[in-house]
Amino acid sequence: MSTEPILEAHDLAKRYGRRTWALTGIDLAIPQGGITALVGPNAAGKSTLIKTWVGFERPTRGNVTVAGIDPQKDRSSVLGLVGYVPQSPSLYDGLSIEDHLDLAVLLRPEFDRAYALRRLDQLGIPAGQGAKSLSGGQQAQVALALALGTRASILLLDEPLASLDPLARREFLHVLTDAVRSEGATALLSSHIVTDVEQACDRLVVLGVGKILLHDTVSDALATHWLATEGAATPAGAAIGSFGGPSGERLTLVRQPASSVGPDLRPASLEEVVLGYLASGRVVPGEAAA
């Protein structure tokens, strides 16, 4: 897997209206290859960040690049590199799935119709089915097949799992992971639930209140984060954030190398890592967002 960044953001900020900041000072470099999970609560700015890379949103400050290209300066080149699945896929009710594939070929001559059909088959969706009869989850799966059919080297997926049941989520992630691994693509997959994506992702970006709270590989995040229960000794300066445990206990996320971890700490799960960082970035009522 290459360490060269393929998605970058430099001092990126986005404001809607006069006061609402969706993103504030984002600096991020996502390397080529594998699947990066972009995790954060609703309204954290995940969709806004993804849309700036597609070119659908113009930064208020700073800039983004896709494979070194600024989408505001050369959007057509960026769109040729990207396969995009929006948060709410919009299919044409009067068309079948096969019609959508034909339309994709018309709009994008390099679209691989046969490949998209194979991915639809993996997802268990008949190509002859009418779009109007699809559930919200099936529409997301069709959108994934359409994105994969572009053979794009970069896949940007905005909360595609939100409308899927647990089995459909697993099938979606299996098809996505298989495609990314076999094609050497790069995928950015956003979600507000880390358990949805932790089995598939290689890297993790935690976004809270428009700011990057953590960017790390999954393996390093798990190797360097620990939990302290209430009353346990916490190394000075190592505490990240505190949150409630499943039984009402108070848990504190701690970042420490394994070599210096004491007996009062236990390994944190990926979900607990995310919760600790989100707790650290929580906005105090009345505090300005930017």
Image (cartoon, grey):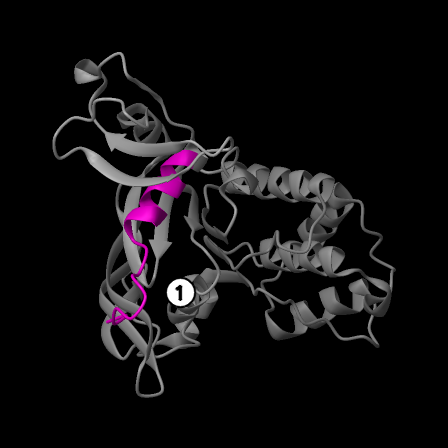
- On the image, the x and y values in percent for residue 284 come to 29, 61
Q: Residue at x 79, y 60 (%)?
A: 135
Say which of 158 and 155 sits in front: 158
Q: Is residue 35 left or right of residue 239?
A: right
Up/down of 197 relative to 221, above or below = below
Q: Is residue 94 left or right of residue 49?
A: right
Q: In which quarter of the image is the N terminus?
A: top left
* Residue that carries the numbered disc 1 in the rendered image: 45
How many callouts does the rendering have?
1
Q: Residue at x 29, y 53 (%)?
A: 281
Say which of 160 and 212 sits in front: 212
For residue 74: magenta?
A: no
Direction top: furthest residue = 263
Counting other residues with Cα less than 10 Å from the Cα at mark 1, is it few (<14), some (14-19), or many (20 or more)?
Answer: many
Direction bottom: furthest residue = 18
Up/down of 141 relative to 107, above or below = above
Residue 43 position by quadrant: bottom left
**Magenta stretch?**
272-290
Amino acid carrying label 1: it is Gly
- On the image, the x and y values in percent for residue 271 come to 45, 36
Residue 16 position by quadrant: bottom left
- On the image, the x and y values in percent for residue 198 come to 49, 36
Q: Residue at x 31, y 83 (%)?
A: 19
Q: In this view, does 284 lie to the left or right of 42?
A: left
Q: Quadrant of the C terminus?
A: bottom left
Up/down of 132 relative to 135, above or below = below
Direction left: furthest residue = 236
Judged from the image, the secondary structure of the residue bearing numbered disc 1 is loop
Q: In this view, does 103 lie to the left or right of 223?
A: right
